[in-house]
C-alpha cells in the first residue's frame, strides 16, 4: 500500500534528505585515490552523526556499514572494507540513507576517481541524466511505470544495460516502502501516482549486460560480464504540477 504523505510529514522528511545531500557533497570533496572504501564509510558515518541523524543502513537487514560503497562492476550494496583501495580510473557509487525526525532520506552519487576511461565517464553522466529523464513530466496522475519506461528508453539508446533486479522505492518512516519503482517498464501502466507520494528514483545502469549476481558476502551485486555500472538516486515528492527533489 502506498502511504501518501501529508505536508507535515514532507516537512519532517526535508531534514534527513538535506543531511544525505550534504553528506554526499562532503564525500565528493574528500574521496580520492588511495582511500579505502572503509574510509569512505567512516566519512559518511561521521558526517551523518555530526548532523544529529543516524545512518539508516547500519544494521538494516544485518548490513554492517553506514554507506553502500560500490566500485566499478559492483552495481549496488557494496560492503565497505579496509582492503578495497580506490585507484585512479575507478568509479565509486556511494549510497547514503539517514534517519532524522523518524523519517529517512536516501540518495546516491557515482564519483569518478581521477581520470576515467571516456566511455565510463559517459556512463556516469548518462546515468545521472536517466534520473532526470525519469522524472520528466512526472506529476500527480502519472502512471508509475512511465518513470522506468523513460529511464530505459534513454539508457538503451546508448546501448547500456538497465539493471532489473534492483529498483527504486517509496520512503518515509521506513527506508523501503511501496511502491517498487523499476527502471524499466511499459508506458501508461502502473498505478497513477498521487500528489504527496514520496519516491526514491534510482537508475542503475551498466556499460554492458544488465545481468548481475550476488557476491558471497550476500550484499554486493556485480555485473556478470564485469562491465562497470553507475547509480544515481534522489528522494522526490510527487506534486500536483511536477516533482520536488528533496536531496538536491
Ligand atoms: N539506498 C539503498 C537501497 O535503497 C540503501 C540500502 S541500505 C542497506 O537499497 F542496508 F540495505 F544496504
Ligand atoms: Co534507495
Image: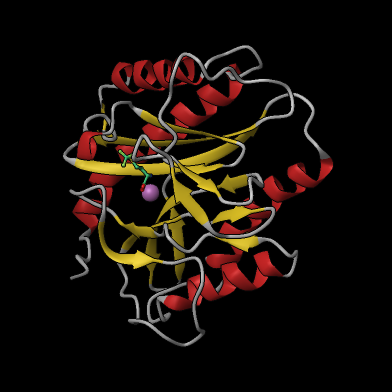
Question: What percent of the width, then of the height, locates residue 53?
Answer: 26, 27
Residue 247 lies in quadrant = top left
Q: Residue at x 61, y 65 (%)?
A: 133
Work out whether 188 lies above or below 171.
below
Is residue 248 among the parts visible in the rendering? no
Question: What percent of the width, then of the height, locates residue 21?
Answer: 45, 35
Which one is in front, 93 or 6? 93
Coloration mode:
secondary structure
Q: Is residue 14 left or right of residue 28?
A: left
Work out whether 248 lies above or below 158.
above
Which one is in front, 141 or 124? 124
Q: Is residue 173 left or right of residue 35?
A: left
Work out whether 68 lies above or below 211.
above
Q: Residue at x 25, y 22 (%)?
A: 52
Q: Residue at x 36, y 40 (%)?
A: 219
Residue 56 lies in quadrant = top left
Question: What percent of the width, then of the height, locates residue 73?
Answer: 59, 41
Is residue 102 among the parts visible in the rendering? yes
Amino acid at each position: 500500500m502506498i502511504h501518501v504523505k501529508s505536508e507535515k510529514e514532507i516537512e519532517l522528511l526535508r531534514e534527513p534528505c538535506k543531511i544525505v545531500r550534504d553528506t554526499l557533497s562532503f564525500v565528493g570533496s574528500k574521496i580520492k585515490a588511495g582511500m579505502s572504501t572503509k574510509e569512505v564509510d567512516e566519512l559518511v558515518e561521521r558526517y551523518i552523526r555530526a548532523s544529529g541523524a543516524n545512518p539508516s543502513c547500519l544494521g538494516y537487514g544485518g548490513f554492517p556499514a553506514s554507506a553502500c560503497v560500490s566500485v566499478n562492476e559492483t552495481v549496488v550494496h557494496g560492503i565497505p572494507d579496509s582492503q578495497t583501495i580506490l585507484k585512479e580510473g575507478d568509479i565509486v557509487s556511494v549510497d547514503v540513507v539517514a534517519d532524522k525526525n523518524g523519517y529517512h532520506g536516501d540518495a546516491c552519487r557515482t564519483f569518478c576517481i581521477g581520470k576515467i576511461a571516456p566511455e565510463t565517464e559517459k556512463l556516469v553522466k548518462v546515468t545521472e541524466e536517466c534520473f532526470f529523464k525519469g522524472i520528466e513530466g512526472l506529476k500527480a496522475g502519472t502512471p508509475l511505470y512511465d518513470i522506468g519506461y523513460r529511464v530505459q528508453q534513454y539508457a538503451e539508446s546508448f546501448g547500456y544495460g538497465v539493471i532489473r533486479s534492483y529498483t527504486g522505492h517509496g520512503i518515509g518512516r521506513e527506508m523501503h516502502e511501496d511502491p517498487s519503482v523499476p527502471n524499466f517498464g511499459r508506458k501508461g501502466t502502473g498505478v497513477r501516482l498521487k500528489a504527496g507520494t514520496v519516491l526514491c528514483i534510482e537508475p542503475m545502469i551498466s556499460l554492458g549486460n544488465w545481468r548481475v549476481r550476488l557476491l558471497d558476502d550476500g550484499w554486493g551485486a556485480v555485473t556478470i560480464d564485469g562491465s562497470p555500472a553507475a547509480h544515481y538516486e534522489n528522494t522526490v515528492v510527487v506534486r500536483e504540477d511536477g516533482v520536488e527533489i528533496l536531496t538536491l
